[in-house]
Amino acid sequence: MTNTGVKTAAVIVLYFPEWDVLSSLIKSLASQVSNVYLISNGLQIEIYSLLKLQGGFNKLHFLEGNPGLGAALNEGLRFAIQDDCDYLFLFDQDSLTPPNFVNSMLREFNKLQYEPQKIAVIGPSFFDLRSSELELNLFKRNGFAVWPKIGEVFPIECDCIITSGMLVNLRVIDPIQYFDESYFVDQVDSEWCFRLRSLGYRIYGTTKVMLGHRLSESTGLRVGPITFLRYNPIRRYWFYKNSIRLVKSPITAMVWKFRLCLNLLISFVPNIFLDRNAILSCKMMLKGFRDGLFAR
């Protein structure tokens, strides 16, 4: 463990992972944090055997069935609180950290200590592990203002950030805010961030620390400033359903209600052509829209 003075932990959520990517992530984090928790929503027997041989983690916990991303992250939060950790890093199984990731994130967080407000979360910038092009700074900040200004290198306040790589300040969030498990997978992070902000907490992202991450199931299609990502029909269902739920939520700012609706409208037709099973994707997007609208 390279950092001193604070107790850090990392939770990795598993769902039928690719062994090489997961193994590299565990090895990297084992030398950087006090505790590594693996929370499984589904795990092949062969991966389980490889994990036991490799080690490098403190807990391997299996959830019954597949209750989703929010439930797995909440289990990691509970473990970190039980172990009296100061900070918890959240990771998807398809991320890859550089050797100095944790200390770099802590340094970025410490730049904010002069702020009188409650700093709850800070997240890194990202690049797609399958692409040589750096996809910098996927912050969703201030509604439509996504990209940093030229020369903007200090941590930037955000409306919300994606889960993987985020540093959660367990010392300030009181009582702890757990993820809404009913969101299952998509928009779990957005709902949680919006809720934190509604309670007076602040969220930041940094352009100074990079995290390798697989941003979707395969490399996306870039059209001008917009990148369309490829997903299976089930993910399309949850994205549409949960986006509509966020639009209806009182904790969602008006600019975000507009942005979410516009995103669903603009992406509908390209999604059909991007996905391998176009007809089923179309049906699932429409079903998700209906179920989100009528709270099914």
Image (tube, rainbow, N blue to C red):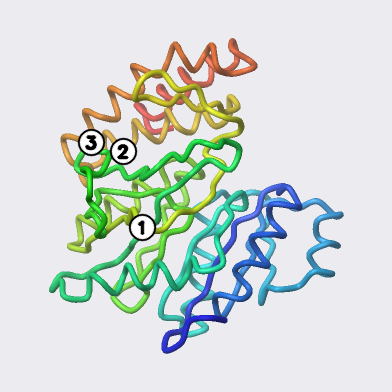
User: How far across and down, in percent of the image, does residue 47 sit?
Assistant: 81, 56
Please say if the residues under marks 1 and 3 sit with CB atoms less than 8 Å apart: no
Q: Amino acid at mark 2?
A: Leu
Element at label 2: helix
Position of 222 relative to 71 (above/below): above
What residue do we see at 30% from left, 30% from top?
A: 260
What residue sits 36% from the left and 27% below the top?
A: 294
Element at label 1: strand
Q: In the image, what residue type sits under mark 3?
A: Trp
Front: mark 1 or 3: 1
Which residue is depicted at the point 42% across and 47% down?
A: 188
Marks 2 and 3, the one that precedes in the sequence: 2
Q: Earlier in the sequence, mark 1 or mark 3?
A: 1
Foreground tag (2 vs 3) = 3
- Marks 2 and 1 in Cβ contact (< 8 Å): no
Mark number, residue 256 = 3
- Which residue corresponds to mark 1? 208
Q: Residue 143 occupies which quadrant of the picture?
A: top left
Relative to 276, 179 lies left or right: left
Q: Quadrant of the N terminus?
A: bottom right
Residue type, numbered disc 1: Lys
Q: Which residue bears the numbered disc 2?
A: 246
> In this rendering, which labeled residue sits more in front, label 2 or label 1?
1
Hey, which quadrant is residue 210 in on the image? bottom left
